[in-house]
Amino acid sequence: MRLAALIGAVVSTLALSVTAANATPSRGVTGTIISKTTFGGKDYIVREITLDPGGSTGWHYHRGTLFALVRAGTLTHTESDCTSTDVYPKGSAFTEPSGTDHVHIGRNLGKKPVVLEVLYVLPAGSPLSDDAPNPGCDFD
């Protein structure tokens, strides 16, 4: 019985390690939490995010809904099908739905920083995002 539990733990650890090894880390991204409150089993977090020129969020998804406003620059947002790309210039607002079927990446292809003001509505205690491997796109 103990051997089966040990084998299960090792297999689980290896599976998690493979996922983490395939993740695409962000680069040139900084974020500051402006406010956070929890109500009704959900975290409401306001965060300012800056992507430097050439910066990328890395491939990821969210466990809840994200609402964003582009304060400066232009964000290029690509879905995991590698062809659905939206471009959000200064003043644009957009929503990112939750779940593993909504893996995406945000990139700054411009010469000025992209500044986002973001509201995360997440299940209480969830991370802001979960890393995901590149789905096969020929960038990042």
Image (cartoon, helix red, strand yellow):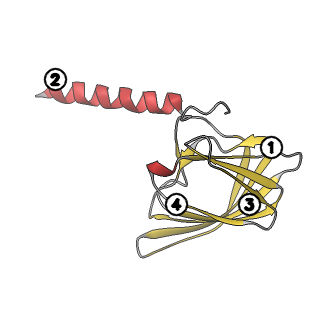
Between the C-alphas of marks 1 and 4, the distance is 23 Å
Q: Indicate which label's residue lies in the foreground, 1 or 2.
A: 1
Image coordinates of residue 129 in percent, x first then y, are 54, 51
- Residue located 82% across and 63% down the image: 90
Look at mark 4 in the image and give the residue it sits on: 97
Q: Mark 3 packing: few (<14 Cα in 10 Å), some, or many (20+)?
A: many
Q: Is residue 88 left or right of residue 67?
A: right
Q: Nearer the viewer, residue 121 or 38?
A: 121
Look at mark 1 in the image and give the residue it sits on: 109
Between the C-alphas of marks 1 and 3, the distance is 15 Å
Q: Is residue 27 left or right of residue 20?
A: right
Q: Amino acid at mark 3?
A: Leu
- Residue 9 lies in quadrant: top left
- Residue 45 lies in quadrant: bottom right
Between the C-alphas of marks 4 and 3, the distance is 17 Å
Q: Secondary structure at mark 4?
A: loop
Pointer 1 and pointer 4: residues touching (CB < 8 Å)?
Answer: no
Q: Amino acid at mark 2?
A: Leu
Q: Is residue 78 above or below residue 115?
A: above
- Residue located 76% across and 42% down the image: 55
Q: Earlier in the sequence, mark 1 or mark 3?
A: 1
Q: Is residue 122 above or below residue 138?
A: below
Q: Earlier in the sequence, mark 4 or mark 3?
A: 4
- Residue located 48% across and 58% down the image: 98
Mark number, residue 3: 2
- Residue 59 lies in quadrant: top right
Pointer 2 and pointer 3: residues touching (CB < 8 Å)?
Answer: no
Pointer 4 and pointer 3: residues touching (CB < 8 Å)?
Answer: no
Q: Earlier in the sequence, mark 1 or mark 2?
A: 2
Look at mark 3 in the image and give the residue it sits on: 116
